[in-house]
Amino acid sequence: MPTALVTGATSGIGASCVREFIGAGWKVVGTGRRADRLEALREEMGDAFMPCVFDVRDEAARDAALDALDGDFAQIDCLVNNAGLALGMAAPWEADLNDWKTMIDTNVTALVSITRKLLPMLVERKGAIINISSVAATYPYKGGNVYGGTKAFVRQFSLGLRSDLNGTGVRVASIEPGMVETEFTVIRNGGNQEAADAFYEGVNPMTGDDIAETVLWVATLPPHLNINTLELMPVRQAFAGFSVERE
């Protein structure tokens, strides 16, 4: 029975990945900061789920939790780097620098760090790394400056890993969704649910389950196939036009 480790498993795409993988017969280690959410997942999913409570930015807490895993849960076959966030939509000269640093620390530094920790095991087991990036990695938009930069890093890091891991049997994919209705936009708007609802209204956006199904599909492809990058959008979302200022 293979085992996946999913970061950011307390809500949204991460929680959906937990359910999707376990439904397909996997065991799953799920990480997150909110112990109550992880415990609820354990009650829902049973013995196939192992919660690990830590902030991905806290390397000492991460190492202690992961080093304590045993049995099948200690043998990771697929790392799903899902933990990430966007904070704020202010003009860059008005943005909170701490928000920028938090996005970089979470979306870039923590992702790189946990990947490096698990790489020897993933090479040994000829596993897979699936990084959740975003269409923001490719298509800029107002207010997305640092967030888009972090996701561009994830995309390029994935391609670089794929190059460096060639010959090891480890597969690496960058999954790049557009509009997915989760807590993501609530957090970005400082907890404003109404702003998040307005953002998605009338769009019929993708769901966490949609992305989780895609992640599982990538993880369970024959071992000689690699998805380098995969971009997804709801039908009602398309590429933005150029922004032009006129006198």
Image (tube, rainbow, N blue to C red):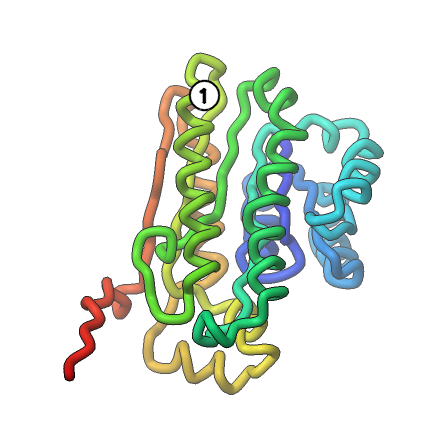
For this orientation, the residue located farthest to the left is 247
Res. 238 visible in picture: yes
Q: Quadrant of the N terminus?
A: top right
Q: Percent from the top left, x then y, of residue 143?
A: 41, 70
Give the left or right position of residue 33, taking residue 6 as reference. Answer: right
Q: Percent from the top left, x then y, of residue 135?
A: 35, 55
Three-letter amino acid code at the position of disc 1: Asp
For this orientation, the residue located farthest to the bottom is 194
Up the image or down, 39 lies above or below 58; here it is below
Give the left or right position of residue 145, taking residue 29 as reference. Answer: left
Residue 22 image-quadrant placement: top right
For this orientation, the residue located farthest to the top is 167
Residue at the spot of label 1: 164
Q: Nearer the viewer, residue 138 or 232?
A: 138
Give the left or right position of residue 99, taking residue 132 as reference. Answer: right
Q: Nearer the viewer, residue 173 or 141?
A: 141
Task: Categorize mark 1 by other alpha carbons within 10 Å: few (<14), some (14-19), many (20+).
Answer: few
Label total for image: 1
Residue 59 image-quadrant placement: top right
Q: Percent from the top left, x then y, of residue 231?
A: 33, 49
Residue 10 image-quadrant placement: bottom right
Residue at image coords 39%, 32%: 159
